[in-house]
Amino acid sequence: MKKPLRVTITGAAGQIGYALAFRIASGDMLGKDQPVILQLLEIPPAMDALKGVAMELDDCAFPLLQDIICTDDPNVGFKDSNVALLVGARPRGPGMERKDLLEANGKIFGPQGKAINDHASRDVKVLVVGNPANTNALIAQANAPDINPRQFTAMTRLDHNRALAQLAGKTGQHHTAIKGMIIWGNHSATQYPDIAHCTVDGKGAKDLVDEGWYKDDFIPTVQQRGAAIIKARGASSAASAASAAIDHIRDWHLGSNGEWVSMAVPSDGSYDIKEGVIYSFPVICKDGDYEIVQGLDIDDFSRERMDLTDKELREERDGVKDLL
Ligand code: NAX
């Protein structure tokens, strides 16, 4: 039997954490032959609820689940962690400015980055889900100087999957027929869902849909999908967010089989996005690593949107520069 891998989930008693833990324990993320130890991190007021999650996990009798650790101490939660899913975050309260939100989250992601630095496995794969995800990932990364910065990523896979669903619905094809979807930039309303390089059943997506739909319907629908879910469900996306987090780590760990997927990763100058922010790019995952897809033609329409979301990320970064 393989050696168990340790998976940390922060905010594990929250709605995304609740949806994540059971799928990870059943083998959906790291493989059906990979035993796991779940290290569930919460804050003190949520420890009773977390105990309930652990009781339910026990009651599932998952063959792959070797142990469950419940803690409110990041030093324990990240000990020897191989995969760290940073879900718990401070939500925006009434009247809270973006700057206050960034700072409040800095106080969570700074210490968690340090705990990862001090205690996690050296090859830990970090995925930040908690919003503002890209900038929270940057803060965690800055506080973990001994870990390769490339191992800090943020989630735009939910946006990617939402874009696949919209295009599939419009073209009447199954989403598995779609290749080459891209989300550029920030996980926010400035993200740029780009179909310029997409094919649907081998045909160029741009030839299958009219430009008006693409610009005035598709892009805003994907950008605003989170708000539409809140309106319909009365609560924010949870199962779909957990599913996207599982897709992100599964592909990073096991490979994306040559397919492009969107991941927010430290910019390296590709596509003139200068270093210093965690920006969503198309990537291909292989052998436990990812590479940004290179050499794509970027037209003026795309350039403008890619730069706009980059600008927002740099403003967010400037708002937390004392935490970096
Ligand atoms: P919930 O409020 O249901 O759960 C959050 C949990 O985190 C709570 O149980 C809370 O006690 C815990 N928590 C807070 N501070 C913590 C800390 N310092 N250490 C450990 N745990 C802590 O929120 P949920 O719906 O699960 O959403 C979690 C985060 O995901 C939010 O920030 C949300 O905005 C973000 N999302 C990100 C998405 C993405 O695509 N990147 C999409 C879905 C989601 O909106």
Image (spheres, rainbow, N blue to C red):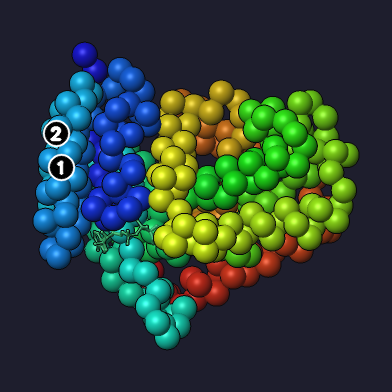
Q: What residue type is labelled 1?
A: Ala
Q: Is residue 103 left or right of residue 195?
A: left
Q: Can you give x and y, in whole percent of width and height, for residue 127 in the image?
A: 39, 48
Kindly report the distance in space between the C-alpha atoms of the residues bearing marks 2 and 1: 6 Å
Residue shown at 20% from the left, 57% from the top: 42
Q: Please tell me in which quarter of the rendered image ligand 1 is found.
A: bottom left
Q: Neighbour class for label 1 at 10 Å: few (<14), some, many (≥20)?
A: many
Residue 148 makes an appearance in the image: no
Considering only vertical position in the picture, is 288 above or below 124? above
Residue shown at 84% from the left, 44% from the top: 209
Considering only vertical position in the picture, is 164 above or below 254? below
Q: Are marks 2 and 1 in contact (CB under 8 Å)?
A: yes
Instruction: State which quadrant residue 91 falls in.
Output: bottom left
Q: Neighbour class for label 2 at 10 Å: few (<14), some, many (≥20)?
A: few
Residue tagged 2: 58
Query: Which of the image's four quarters has the N terminus?
Result: top left
Query: Which of the image's four quarters has the C terminus?
Result: bottom left
Q: Can you give x and y, in whole percent of width and height, for residue 118 in the image?
A: 20, 52
Q: In this view, does 36 lie to the left or right of 324?
A: left
Considering only vertical position in the picture, is 216 above or below 211? below
Helix, strand, or loop for circle 1? helix
Residue at mark 1: C-beta within 8 A of ligand 1: no
Q: Foreground residue, 58 or 274? A: 58
Q: Foreground residue, 314 or 90? A: 90
Residue shown at 52% from the left, 32% from the top: 285
Residue 38 makes an appearance in the image: yes
Q: What residue type is labelled 2?
A: Asp
Residue tagged 1: 54
Q: Foreground residue, 274 or 220? A: 220
Q: Can you give x and y, in whole percent of width and height, for residue 21 in the image?
A: 28, 40
Residue shown at 61% from the left, 61% from the top: 224
Residue at mark 2: C-beta within 8 A of ligand 1: no
